[in-house]
Amino acid sequence: MTPTRETVLAALRCITDPRTGSDLISADIIRALTVENGRIRFVMEVDRGDGETMEAVRVETVTALEALVGPGNVIAVLTAENRTAPPPDPGVRKSSGEPRPLKGVKAIIAVASGKGGVGKSTVSANLAVALAALGRRTGMLDADVYGPSQPRMLGVSGRPASPDGRTILPLRNHGVTLMSIGLMTREDEAVVWRGPMLMGALQQMLRQVQWGQLDVLIVDLPPGTGDVQMTLAQQTSVAGAILVSTPQDIALLDARKAIDMFRKMKTPVLGMIENMSTHICRRCGHEEHVFGHGGARADAERLGLPFLGEIPLDIDIRLAADGGAPIVVSKPESPQARAFLGIARKLIDDDIV
Ligand code: ADP
């Protein structure tokens, strides 16, 4: 029997928060609760310093809820954050808790953009499958809170399982191991991620997912310069960031802000990719520069960053990504696929992955 949300809430009301003597719901520490298809997921938000006490409560809660849905169907994550602390200053890296490497993962590469809609996720998906095609053990962490699109682009559906209620088994397709923040919520559920929740979710995706042995983990970041970028840099050592930009000036202006943020976070910027660079007319072969051309290359040069390559504006790139098999997989011999493979090859040749 699948329990209702009310049944789960009632069960949570039967568990006592030892710090206050009140139940978990009255204590207001349960966040992002979802009850779906016989699975229960939630975050327990507690103050830093209470971590140890509350870990015991987390285990007790998982056991109690497993009585409703069976072993392995409860995912509960504890976020021991200091809820009264002011938000981190974007100009400074947190001094406590140095970023730790991720066990089994050789390099984490963040893919970022100054603004949305420039094709960051499309580029991330194609780069990931290109690196896998070139023999690199590749993972994809989709942290784009505003529009997690990697499950669709990489053709993955279904939910990640958690046989032990603690670790999460990622999904896999086209040779890429995938976990997405979109898989932590219901598809029809609009979630406003608050800072601590976001940190909890990201932490869970980094540390509790069984990534296995990876040469590279690509992180598809949300556009702009926000909490996720900062949390990622604070929680783990990122080998570097790749910036995706269209040639339009406005996008480039935003890209410069993102470069500045990574510099402050001490994350090396590995280079820029210009997306939607040129358009070749299928009928006459004429080359058009829909959004201008060469802006990212010129900008990269000016900023002393490597220019990693340019990707044309092409309907097949869009159709392939929307259809769940990126063009590198569906048409590996096409010039568009070769553009992505060339960038992946460059990352390998430059010893980045
Ligand atoms: P972002 O992650 O930056 O928000 P997406 O990767 O979701 O952007 O891309 C936005 C839209 O543009 C999608 O519909 C995608 O298929 C399309 N798109 C991205 N890159 C290209 C390209 N090079 N040619 C054609 N369409 C593209």
Image (cartoon, rainbow, N blue to C red):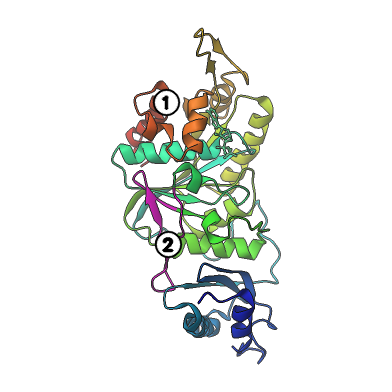
- Whether residue 98 is visible, yes or no, is no
Q: Amino acid at mark 1?
A: Ala
Structural distance between the alpha carbons of marks 2 and 1: 31 Å
Q: Amino acid at mark 2?
A: Val
Give the vertical position of 37 relative to 124 (above or below): below
Region in magenta: 156-178
Residue 148 placement (x, y as % from top left) = 56, 49
Give the vertical position of 62 relative to 95 (above or below): below
Is 1 part of what is drawn in magenta? Answer: no
Give the vertical position of 208 relative to 109 (above or below): below
Q: Residues within 10 Å of mark 1 (few under 14, many from 20)?
A: some
Residue drawn at x 65%, y 25% is 248
As drawn, the residue found furthest toward the bottom would be 21
191 to the left or right of 155: right
Judging depth in this view, the residue of 198 and 106 nearest the camera is 198
- Whether residue 238 is visible, yes or no, is yes
Location of mark 2 (residue): 209
